[in-house]
Image (cartoon, helix red, strand yellow):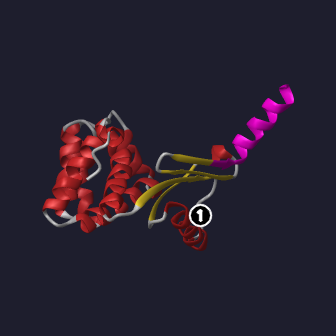
Amino acid sequence: METSGGIQASLAGRYASALFGLARDERKIDAVGRSLDALASALADSRDFAELVSSPMVGRQDAARAFAALAPGLGLDPITTNFLGVLARNGRKSELRKIIRFFKRIAAEHRGEISAEVVTAHPLKDDQVVALKAQLKKRAGRDVTLDAQVDPDILGGIVIKLGSEMIDASIRTKLNRLAQAMRG
């Protein structure tokens, strides 16, 4: 399990590490990973669910009840369902997005993969994901798991964080460099 200061130093990282440890002990890493994927999709696709997670107006007990009611519909495993209840009761539901990202990174490292954070202005198509994984595998020398995010503010291009290496080929950065060069 990843024990470097990067993940462990943050609150979300500690929760993700605890969830991973429990999933590993119960031999349910894949099941929890699938459940977290379902939660990530729900956060992206459902405005109501995203608001439930981020709104400080939803109390701890109400959030715990809502998570318990939504879990069967999302197909969540028991470990993840219980974990959501703990997050809600501890007032940490707003950390869910980060926890999902950190869990994926820890699980990838556990499988001997490296995780790459990828930001694009538009969602990547399946063939683009395959090609990008192949290129990053050549560069890293091992399998790569992508954590893809969409940020329209980069205007176009791609930003990749692979381990400690950052590759910024976004249009926003190129325009900023051009503006700096023109200023002299």
- Name the quadrant containing residue 21: bottom left
Any part of residue 57 in sight: yes
Q: Is residue 108 left or right of residue 45?
A: left
Count of numbered tags:
1
The picture places residue 170, in percent across and down from the top left corner, at: 68, 48
Q: Can you tell which quarter of the image residue 86 is in?
A: top left
Q: Residue at x 58, y 66 (%)?
A: 135
- Above or below, 146 against 8 in this view is below
Query: Is 66 on the left-hand or right-hand side of 152?
Result: left
Is residue 52 among the parts visible in the rendering? no
**Between 93 and 61, which is closer to the camera in this rendering?**
93
Does residue 182 show up magenta in the picture? yes
| Residue 10, horizontal then vertical, whole percent | 32, 36
The spot of residue 56 in percent (x, y) is 33, 33
Q: Would you name the residue on which mark 1 appears?
A: 124
Say what amino acid the circle numbered 1 marks. Leu
Q: Residue furthest top?
A: 184
Of helix, strand and loop, which one carries label 1?
Answer: loop
Residue at the extreme front of the image, as rendered: 141
> Neighbour class for label 1 at 10 Å: few (<14), some, many (≥20)?
some
Q: Is residue 77 above or below residue 66?
A: below
Q: Give percent across and percent down for residue 17.
A: 25, 48
Instruction: State yes or no: residue 122 in magenta.
Output: no
Q: Is residue 117 left or right of residue 95?
A: right
**What quarter of the picture does the C terminus occupy?**
top right
Q: Main secondary structure of the magenta part?
A: helix
User: What's the residue at 59%, 71% (across, down)?
Assistant: 131
* Residue pictured at 41% horizontal, 53% vertical: 43
Q: Which residues are magenta?
A: 168-184
**Which residue is found at the position 55% from the left and 61% from the top?**
139
